[in-house]
Image (tube, rainbow, N blue to C red):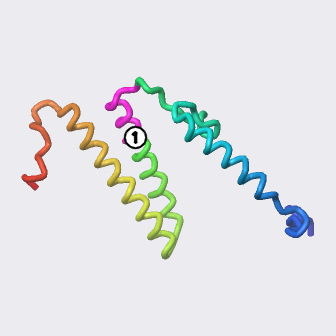
């Protein structure tokens, strides 16, 4: 029978040098703390332009949460037992986040014919 995966590395001879990694991470974090306006070299790929307005940000957050809802619901259908319960809990958190973002959007720009959201004292 043909083996499809290579042998695992010998942990005694091929362990990574964590001191070098730690030193590199410390240097990156220190540079970020000294100059907070300097973009992080680790996360510069996923940036949001500073001039994007709040409704646009909330709309994209809502769409992202809706996608997460669909993906976790689909995943939960393939799982059983406690793993299914975890996937459904994640799905419920996505739905809650989506509801919160939608309410924030409604508070910023209420739909036609709808009064402003009730205050906490009305709940």
Q: Position of residue 104 (x, y in %)?
A: 26, 41
Q: Which residue occupies the foreground of this view, 86 or 14?
A: 14
Residue in view at x 43 percent, y 60 percent: 90
In the image, 20 versus 97, the foreground residue is: 20
Give the residue drawn at x 65%, y 42%: 28
* Residue 105 in the image, given as x and y percentages of width and height: 26, 37
In this view, which residue lies farthest toward the left? 122
Residue 19: name its quadrant: bottom right
Circle 1 residue: 61
Image quarter of residue 52: top left
Where is the N terminus found, in terms of image quarters? bottom right
Residue at 72 percent of width and 47 percent of height: 24
**Which of the image's four quarters has the C terminus?**
bottom left
Q: Which residues are magenta?
A: 52-63
Q: Is residue 34 magenta?
A: no
Residue 35, above or below 64: above
Magenta residues: mostly which secondary structure? Answer: helix
Question: Is residue 82 depicted above or below 116 in this figure?
Answer: below
Q: Closer to the camera, 48 or 111?
A: 48
120 and 28: which is toward the camera: 28
What is the residue that sits farthest to the front in this orientation? 34
**Relative to residue 121, is residue 93 drawn left or right?**
right
Q: Position of residue 83 (x, y in %)?
A: 51, 70
């Amino acid at each position: 029978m043909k083996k499809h995966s290579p042998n695992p590395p010998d942990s005694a001879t091929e362990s990574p040098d964590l001191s070098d990694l730690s030193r590199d991470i410390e240097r990156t974090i220190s540079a970020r703390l000294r100059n907070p306006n300097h973009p992080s070299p680790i996360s510069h790929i996923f940036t949001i332009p500073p001039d994007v307005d709040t409704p646009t940000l909330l709309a994209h957050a809502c769409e992202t949460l809706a996608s997460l809802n669909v993906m976790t619901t689909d995943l939960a259908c393939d799982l059983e037992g406690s793993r299914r319960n975890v996937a459904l809990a994640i799905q419920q958190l996505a739905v809650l986040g989506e509801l919160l973002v939608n309410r924030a959007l409604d508070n910023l720009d209420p739909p036609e014919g709808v009064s402003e959201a009730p205050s906490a004292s009305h709940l």
